[in-house]
Image (tube, grey):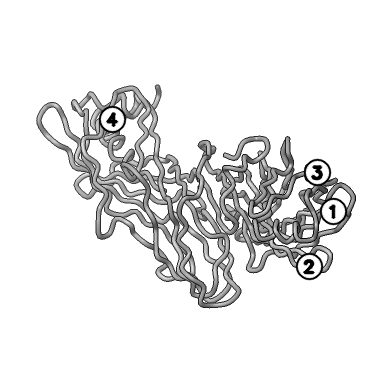
Amino acid sequence: MRWRHRTPPALRRLCAAAAAALVLLGLVSAPPARALPPGDVPAIGVDTGRFKLPIGCTITLGGLPVFYLPTDVDVQGVAPVQLGPGQEFWLTQGSGSITFPSWLTALAPILGIGKADARITDLSIGASGSTPEAVNIAKDRPIEIKDIAIEAGKPLKVGAPVSGTFDVGPFTAPASGATTLQFVRATAEVDLKSSLGFALPIKADCKPAAGNALLKIGVGGPAGQPPAKITGAPLNFAEPASNELVGIIHAPYACTLGGDRLDVGIAVGANIPLTVRRGGSFSFTRASGALTIPPETVNKLIGKGYTTAAGRVTTQNLHVDGGTPATQNVAGAGIEIPRTPLVRDQKIVVPLPADGTLTAGPFTPSPGAASVAVSLGEAAADFTFNGTTAAKATCAAPSPKVYLVENPVT
């Protein structure tokens, strides 16, 4: 109430205008607190995520900045977990929204504002070290939204695009290292429409308020890989908290079992902070995973005479760049793999653990580190086939690296 008492009426009216502008800046990454539902696990090599990134929006009227509002943009999308040198790739299935508080919309009746038209002229997503370094998906075709309803005293949540999803790209990956997907900026030109017969044109410019790293993708392996444009991935995430991501990363693993190479997938889902304060730490919460045995590997096991598989995951290392501990085994005392039938030509997705969650962290930034990156490391499991035959599987860390998160140190 103190803010309202001290703010001049003219500025309050501009706040109402700001509310209508800001809701237009929706962009394009929770697993449940228990086991990952198999239907929510994307294909091997796919990352699905939802992010709630703090942003700050400057509102201008007649070219003059008149108001600044900190808020969040709720973003979700799909990307590959690894890239080859020079590989073409996209962020796909992009969508999102932004929500503004009821105190902003409560001011709208001052000018009789009930609706707004908008043109989003800049919606830029970046990929560090890639070419181009940023793509403005609204450059050639601005996103137009007509007759946005403004209800006084109610929170306002508006998504972009108005319907469906959008793709960001193509980007071309660098020759080596990694590329980080980022929210760069968004700009909207808005006409606020009054029942009194006039329109008030304003502009909203929004940029990240803290870190803007959404997803880090490792680059390596052979060149000449086909374009990575993923479609049809499941995106069933609850809204994360501010400055938090929630997602599922499904990494490809090459494992050795009894002298044979077997390809599997290991999925990890969690809620993870997007930044970490210097001198602080962060952990993964609501963390869980899944083991995927693709049809080709199932058929190899059946070819050995196996009809069922069970066991225990003994190692699932996480590697930490720029922080401590350098390595953490999140399997702890072990994670049971329940007895599962093997059916020819059918993949198996086994939630791990079957119930409950995993512990990952806390991770603490090293002195002077600009960021802390956590990636998937080595894995191992003790298997029992047909209830009697024991065998140990060992799996090297994925190459190139599969990153779970890269947190800027703020």
Q: Which residue is mark 3?
A: 336
Mark 2 or 1 closer to N-term?
Answer: 2
Q: Position of residue 249 (x, y in %)?
A: 60, 52
Of residues 176 and 34, the one nearer the viewer is 34
Mark 4 or 2 closer to N-term?
Answer: 4
Vertical side of 218 occupied by 324: above or below: above
Identity of the amino acid at label 1?
Asp
Quarter holding residue 82: bottom right
Q: Which mark is residue 355?
A: none
Mark 3 or 2 closer to N-term?
Answer: 2
Vertical side of 219 occupied by 111: above or below: above
Q: Which mark is residue 382?
A: 1
Alpha carbon distance from label 3 to label 4: 59 Å
> Can residue 326 be seen by looking at this rendering?
no
Alpha carbon distance from label 1 to label 4: 65 Å
Alpha carbon distance from label 3 to label 2: 23 Å
Alpha carbon distance from label 4 to label 2: 70 Å
Q: Which residue is mark 4?
A: 12
Q: Which mark is residue 260?
A: 2
Asked if labels 3 and 1 touch by Cβ distance under 8 angstroms, the answer is: no
Mark 1 or 3 closer to N-term?
Answer: 3
Identity of the amino acid at label 4?
Arg
Mark 1 vs mark 4, foreground winner is 1
